[in-house]
Image (tube, grey):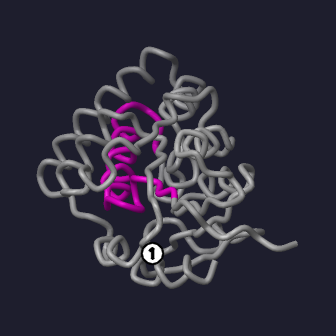
């Protein structure tokens, strides 16, 4: 079957545009130790990275109760904001990649609009995507369900089959596949390459490679 040419590149935010996943994982490990659910770095990546607030809080509530889950999330948001303000950077090679991509782009993230305004603003990327930023808060189901990416494609007026998704998490690439989109799995961050591989997915390790990979389709 002949694939449609790529017309839209959909970026995840955390770990793809901004190097915030390392902050999030460190804080989740700290909070787990403080609140009664000791988690390793790898367990946090597996359970929480790429997932929505609702999914994360549901897991915590099942283990520790809803009150603790709410407190955990409040602490995470506060500490994350402080850490971001202390010095968040774009993902290595991302500015060069954006220069090399000539197709329309947008953002579709499990994070809230408030969080993305903050992280993209601190790193100077918000203007690049303003008006084309979509959150899982806008759809019924978060990743790995396809809802968010289908919503982004619909809002951008592009056939899902002509979309490419850039993701760094297993739920993210699963969501892209479920949406019928091509996935580009960035393995230069926290998620091992073997957790990103799958049908319709190109795994890469350096953001500077992305424009060439997209051009190849």
Q: Residue at x 59, y 53 (%)?
A: 172
- Look at the image and say whether residue 170 sits in the magenta stretch: no
Residue 204 pos. (x, y %):
54, 79
Image quadrant where one finds the C terminus: bottom right
Furthest toward the right, the residue is 1
Q: Is residue 101 above or below residue 144?
A: below
Q: Which residue is mark 1?
A: 188
From the viewer's perspective, is 85 left or right of 15?
A: left
Percent from the top left, x then y, of residue 189?
A: 43, 69
Q: Residue at x 38, y 56 (%)?
A: 21
Looking at the picture, tell me which residue is in the foreground, 123 or 150: 150
Q: Residues within 10 Å of mark 1 (few under 14, many from 20)?
A: some
Q: Which residues are magenta?
A: 10-38
Query: Is residue 68 rendered to the left or right of residue 94?
Result: right
Front residue (pair 192, 19): 19
Residue 161 is left or right of residue 16, and the answer is: right
What residue sits 11% from the left and 52% below the top? 86
- Coordinates of residue 77 in the picture (x, y in percent): 29, 34
Q: Nearer the viewer, residue 90 or 82?
A: 90
Most extreme residue toward the front is 157
């Amino acid at each position: 079957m002949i694939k449609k040419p790529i017309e839209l590149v959909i970026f995840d935010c955390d770990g793809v545009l901004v190097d915030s996943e390392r902050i999030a994982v460190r804080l989740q490990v700290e909070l787990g130790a403080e609140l009664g659910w000791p988690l390793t770095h790898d367990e946090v990546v597996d359970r929480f990275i790429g997932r929505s607030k609702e999914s994360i809080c549901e897991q915590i509530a099942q283990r520790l109760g809803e009150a603790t889950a709410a407190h955990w999330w409040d602490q995470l948001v506060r500490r994350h904001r402080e850490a971001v303000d202390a010095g968040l950077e774009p993902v290595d090679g991302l500015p060069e990649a954006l220069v090399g991509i000539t197709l329309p782009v947008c953002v579709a993230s499990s994070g809230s609009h408030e969080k993305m305004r903050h992280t993209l603003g601190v790193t100077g990327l918000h203007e690049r995507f303003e008006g084309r930023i979509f959150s899982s808060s806008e759809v019924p189901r978060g990743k790995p369900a396809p809802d968010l990416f289908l919503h982004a494609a619909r809002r951008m007026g592009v056939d899902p089959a002509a979309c490419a998704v850039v993701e760094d998490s297993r739920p993210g690439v699963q969501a892209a596949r479920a949406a019928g989109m091509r996935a580009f799995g960035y393995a230069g961050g926290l998620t091992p390459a073997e957790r990103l591989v799958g049908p319709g997915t190109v795994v890469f390790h350096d953001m500077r490679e992305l424009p060439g990979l997209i051009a190849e389709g």
